Image: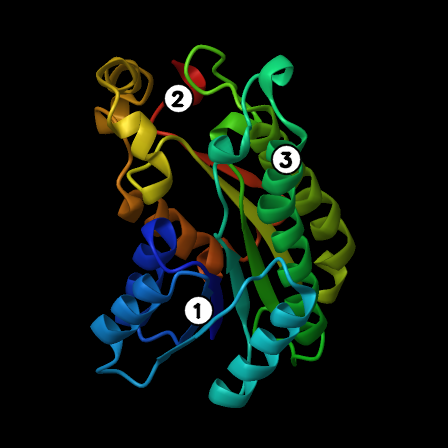
Amino acid sequence: MFVITGSSGIAASTIRKLVEGDARVYFVGVDQESCISLFSELSSTDRIAYQLGDVTAEDVCEQVVAACKARFGRLDGLFNVAGISGRKYGDGPLHESTSEGWQKTIHINLDSQYAMSRAVIRELLQNERNAYGQRGVVLNMSSILGKHPNPAYFSAVAYATSKGAIASMTRTVAAYYAAEGIRINAIAPALTETPMSGRAAADAEIQDFVRKKQALTDGMLHPDDVADVALFLLGDASRVMTGQTILTDGGWSVL
């Protein structure tokens, strides 16, 4: 049973794939329309539930864990997906960025993953170990820009910093909880076809750049491309992996 934060883009693709694979999913999002739409699409099964909520609020994170345990009886993992680009709040190159852009982006992207991970790990520690001696898994959402920046088209200091910090948090937390049988990894996609990437999708020059930079997909990744990697990292096939940030980038990091 997995908790997923978010209801569109990569989150929605992952939720669909998990439910199709007979997993149970409890998701939380702030956008009522997308939450209702996704739930309605999958509501023919009893393996899906959701709530509206802002996971930057620590009490909401605790409520999500309690609600999903009450609904499904057990919690096995978390995928932290929810986040923002921050540009509309003033994120950008350092000399042009605003304090609001910095604080808002760090808060939504980083603080939410901290708070949600803490609430979930407290619950995972109560689980009995499975056949592999493990209690559960946490998967965080980083970004290729946290490790491989691009100043020409994607210079956003708060966004990149938040995503780099997520990779660092992932490694630090993984080191502590490995002995407890809890795995913590991160996934770092390159540019993906999600609501967040609307600016890039509408810019012909950026699209030409991305086709060359993400040669494996001849442009932007599809959310399903990232969801497939997420399913691997959430499942037992990756049971010997922890503390890793997996670049899911179509070639960005080597081109």
Inter-mark Cα distance, 1 to 3: 28 Å
The dot on residue 222 is none
When asked about the image quadrant of residue 162, the answer is top right
Locate residue 199 relative to residue 30 in the image: left or right. Answer: left
Inter-mark Cα distance, 2 to 1: 30 Å
Looking at the picture, does residue 241 appear above or below residue 145?
Answer: below
When asked about the image quadrant of residue 19, the answer is bottom left
Residue at image x 74%, y 45%? 172
Indicate the quadrant containing the C terminus: top left, top right, bottom left or bottom right.
top left
Q: Which residue is mark 1?
A: 27
Which three-letter amino acid code belongs to the residue tagged 3? Glu
Looking at the picture, does residue 148 appear above or below residue 51?
Answer: above
Q: Which residue is mark 3?
A: 100
Which three-letter amino acid code belongs to the residue tagged 1? Phe
Locate residue 115 relative to residue 79 in the image: left or right. Answer: right
Residue at image x 64%, y 33%? 102
Q: Are marks 3 and 2 in contact (CB under 8 Å)?
A: no
Which of disc 2 and disc 3 is earlier in sequence? 3
Looking at the picture, does residue 106 appear above or below residue 77?
Answer: above
Which of disc 1 and disc 2 is earlier in sequence? 1
Q: Which residue is mark 2?
A: 252
User: Considering the numbered disc 2 on the image, is that residue within a helix, a strand or a loop?
Assistant: helix
| Front residue (pair 213, 193) | 193
| Front residue (pair 175, 16) | 16
Q: Is residue 133 visible?
A: no
Residue at image x 26%, y 29%? 201
| Front residue (pair 110, 72) | 110
User: Considering the numbered disc 3 on the image, is that residue within a helix, a strand or a loop?
Assistant: helix
Which three-letter amino acid code belongs to the residue tagged 2? Trp
User: Considering the numbered disc 1 on the image, is that residue within a helix, a strand or a loop?
Assistant: strand
